[in-house]
């Protein structure tokens, strides 16, 4: 029950964080200027290498049960979903041994890095601490 409560709190947090920011599609239909900053993506690359690369590999190609996070497989699975859905999924399931174990900022920055790695353009402003 405690794990379920934590998932509910995380889900509610994600919804609250994005309620005023609108939804952004991963397919390039973002608001003008992009949904993240280059600085967020750079910080996300560092966090990804520290927290995610051991399973998803440094090149984001995935391995075994760890999904590909860049390229056609990722875009096929996530290309029509919103950044809200991506961030929520990450927070509720990653890292597998301690879901929700990263800070909100780490999740947001990793999501920015994934967006950048899949061709979404960076913007010049950041809606701290979340993506638009």
Image (tube, rainbow, N blue to C red):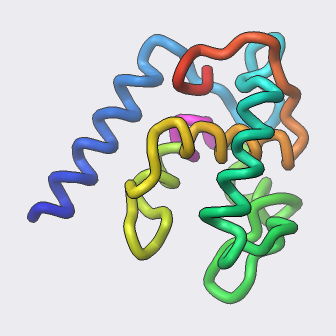
Q: Residue furthest bottom?
A: 64
Locate residue 73, reporting x and y percent.
80, 66
Judge left or right: residue 67 versus residue 84.
right
Locate residue 93, reporting x and y percent.
44, 63
Span shown in magenta: 81-86
Which corner quadrant of the image does residue 64 belong to? Answer: bottom right
Q: Residue furthest left?
A: 1
Residue at the image point whose x is 82% and y is 59% from the top? 70
Residue at the image point whose x is 87% and y is 67% from the top? 59
Let me know if residue 71 is in the magenta part. Answer: no
Residue at the image point whose x is 77% and y is 37% from the top? 41
Locate residue 129, reporting x and y percent.
52, 24
In the image, residue 86 sits, relative to residue 128, either above or below, namely: below
In the image, residue 113 sits, relative to residue 71, either above or below, namely: above
Let me know if residue 82 is in the magenta part. Answer: yes
Dominant SS type (magenta): helix
**What quarter of the picture does the N terminus occupy?**
bottom left
Q: Nearer the viewer, residue 110 or 90?
A: 110
Q: Nearer the viewer, residue 107 or 17?
A: 107
């Amino acid at each position: 029950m405690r794990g379920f409560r934590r998932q509910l709190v995380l889900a509610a947090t994600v919804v609250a964080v994005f309620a005023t920011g609108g939804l952004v599609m991963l397919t390039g239909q973002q608001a003008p200027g992009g949904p993240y900053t280059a600085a967020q993506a750079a910080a996300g690359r560092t966090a990804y290498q520290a927290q995610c690369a051991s399973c998803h590999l440094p090149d984001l190609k995935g391995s075994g049960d760890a999904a590909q996070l860049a390229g056609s497989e990722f875009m096929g699975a996530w290309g029509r979903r919103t950044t809200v859905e991506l961030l929520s999924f990450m927070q509720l399931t990653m890292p597998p041994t301690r879901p929700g174990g990263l800070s909100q900022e780490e999740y947001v920055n990793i999501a920015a890095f994934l967006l950048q790695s899949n061709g979404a353009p960076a913007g010049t402003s950041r809606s701290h601490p979340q993506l638009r």
